[in-house]
Image: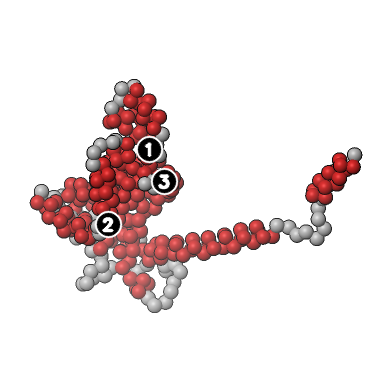
Amino acid sequence: MSAVTTQERAVAAETAPVRGRRGPRGPVVGAVVKYVVLCALAVVFLAPFYILLRNSFMTTAEVTSPDWKWLPGSLNLSNFRDLFSDTERPFARSLGNSLLIAAITAPVSTLFASMAGYALARIDVRGRGLVLGMVVGTLMIPHAVTFLPMFVVVGSFGGVNTLWGLIVPGLFNAFAVILFRSFYLGFPAEIEEAGRVDGLTHLGVYWRLILPNSATMMASLGALAFIEAWNSFLWPLMIGQDPSKWTAQVALSSFLTSQTINLPVLFAGTVVAIFPLVVMFLVAQRYIVEGITASGLKS
């Protein structure tokens, strides 16, 4: 009885409210500090978008004025009309070129990278390590070094001022190959063995079993490839020398030259050009995070 009574007293002492004990102020203060920091960072990151949107509706005098204005005097839609009515800078056609290049480059380059990553991770052939080392080695070479040789090769095949000259060099992504290889290294081997028992070849296993289970990685790296292709500037500038083959980034650069500077129209064009990227990121941000996490970066 004494033991039971002592145990009951201990339980009652633990569950009884302690006089003078304060509430959990520590977690509340921590949450408030966290949200304040997050709001401050959100303001910092969103400030450039606000400035772009504000300046796109301003006149040249308002943009260049030393006096700060939070909002334009009036919604000046003429900047957007001038953007699409300029015959020397076919911005609408440039947007179409960028959309076509990105829409082809993103899925095709992601598929090629997936196939190469699967081969390097699962197909045991002689020289696989050497090929992997060469793929990794390409990441250590600055892109500016390879531009001139690549331009000579593409130009020798007649790729200057052609859409295929803009698209084909971007179909091979060494970084995506490494991520896919890392992802497939952690793929369950039992699924592949079951496919081989059913008589599937390496291509059949990849196409019927591996690829359907790589949807997250395909979506995340495809979104990143779309954003990279849309933002590409130096290669389209070298290949697309004719205005009809300009991309959106090249067309935007034409509004800022040593002779003329049209800042309001430039800001308006930037707002239009980043809109597809904002939509892409909002739609695919969850897949981007999940895909990079799923890769695991195994060696």
Q: Report the residue at 64% width, 61% height from top.
A: 29
Asked whether 47 or 181 is in front, the reply is 181
Q: Report the residue at 52% width, 64% height from top.
A: 40
Where disc 3 sits, the SS reads: loop
User: Residue 214 — which label?
Assistant: 1
**Residue 189 in the image, given as x and y percentages of width and height:** 39, 32
Identify residue for label 3. 296
- Please tell me which of labels 3 and 2 falls first in the chain: 2
- Decide if residue 204 is in sight here: yes
Q: Is residue 261 above or below residue 164?
A: below
Q: Report the residue at 45% width, 69% height from top.
A: 70
Apparent side of residue 212 relative to residue 158 in the rendered image (left or right): right
- Amino acid under label 3? Gly
- Amino acid under label 1? Ser
Task: Give the Cα distance between marks 3 and 1.
Answer: 14 Å
Q: Nearer the viewer, mark 1 or mark 2?
A: 2
- Amino acid under label 2? Met
* Quarter occupied by the N terminus: top right
Task: Give the Cα distance between marks 1 and 2.
Answer: 27 Å
Task: Give the Cα distance between marks 3 and 2.
Answer: 21 Å
Where disc 1 sits, the SS reads: helix
Identify residue for label 2. 140
Q: Nearer the viewer, mark 3 or mark 1?
A: 3
Query: Quick one: label 3, few (<14), some, or many (20+) residues within 10 Å?
Result: some
Where disc 2 sits, the SS reads: loop
**Residue 206 in the image, given as x and y percentages of width and height:** 32, 32
In the rendered view, how is the structure colored? secondary structure
Which of the 4 quarters of the picture holds residue 31? bottom right
- Decide if residue 96 is in sight here: no
Q: Is residue 181 above or below residue 38?
A: above
Which of the 4 quarters of the picture holds residue 262? bottom left
